[in-house]
Image: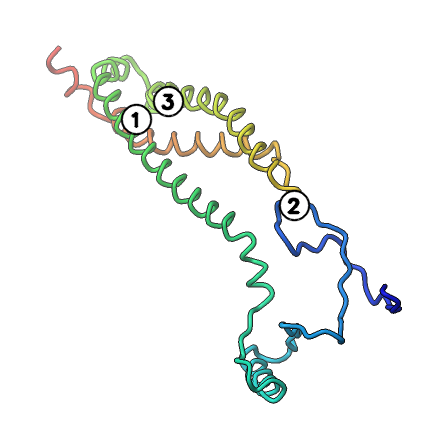
Amino acid sequence: MGGTSFTIVGVVKNMIMESPFNLVRQAIYLVNYDEANGYMNIRINPKMSVSDALVRTEAIFKKLVPAVPFDYQFADTEYGLKFAAEERIGKLASVFATLAILISCLGLFGLASFVAEKRTKEIGVRKVLGATVYNLWKMLSMDFVMLVIISCLIAGPIAWYYLHQWLMKYEYRTDISWWIFPVVIVGALFITIVTVSFQAIKAAIANPVKSLRTE
């Protein structure tokens, strides 16, 4: 190249140097000793602590270029900045998802309390006629379980579509595994049952005499 022969000392595959949103371009990396370079790339001995390595590096740097201040960056930190926005989005999504789950649980708890209160006399009659706690719990919980299943079946395809569109922005991306959606449905059902069960069991074990006293 340019009348100079070079020796290939290594080949790397898909080393992302620029934007992670773009394909990696073919490139040649070489050390040019003839032109001044504003950066020095060094590798710290893994057996040495970072603080000791920086002290020794600074001493050598000041001997070589005493007029230039010693400034350094770590390669892994600089590389991590390429994905800082995605990591921030992931953290925000986790926080808002947690808040959404908590708000949903509060709504379910309030709705379960309201339903149990409205059906107090019905529960008392069923219990007098021989219904067990399990039967009453199943009766009160099944309505909520069916609603959650229907909502998951509606939300699943919509979530897959928008997640797929988001991943398509990346040249290098993961796939959306099919097992994620059954796991989410099971998790939603578990949270629903745990939230509703408190009021359902409380209503099921209540003394039917109190609820039927005014009838």
- Quadrant that contains the N terminus: bottom right
**Circle 3 — which element?**
helix
Mark 3: few, some, or many residues within 10 Å (few <14, many ≥20)?
some
Instruction: Kindly identify the amino acid type of the residue bearing the numbered disc 2.
Output: Asn
Is 188 drawn above or below residue 130 in the view shown?
Answer: below
Image position, residue 115 (x, y; %): 26, 20
Q: Upstream in the sequence, badge 1 or badge 3?
A: 3
Nearer to us of marks 3 and 2 is: 2
User: Do labels 2 and 1 touch, CB within 8 Å?
Assistant: no
Is 204 drawn above or below residue 69 in the view shown?
Answer: above
Instruction: Kindly identify the amino acid type of the residue bearing the numbered disc 1.
Output: Ala
Q: Which residue is mark 3?
A: 144
Q: Which residue is mark 1?
A: 200
Image position, residue 79 (x, y; %): 59, 59
Mark 1–mark 3 distance (CA, rounded to whole Å): 11 Å
Mark 3–mark 2 distance (CA, rounded to whole Å): 46 Å
Image position, residue 195 (x, y; %): 34, 32
Q: Is residue 114 left or right of residue 161?
A: left
- Quadrant that contains the C terminus: top left
- Residue at horizontal 20 percent and vertical 20 percent from the top: 208
Image position, residue 81 (x, y; %): 54, 57
Q: Which residue is mark 2?
A: 22
Q: Quadrant of residue 82?
A: bottom right
Q: Upstream in the sequence, badge 2 or badge 1?
A: 2
Q: Nearer the viewer, residue 111 or 77?
A: 77
Q: Quadrant of residue 176?
A: top right
Nearer to us of marks 1 and 3 is: 3
- Residue at horizontal 88 percent and vertical 67 percent from the top: 3
Q: Nearer the viewer, residue 61 or 37?
A: 37
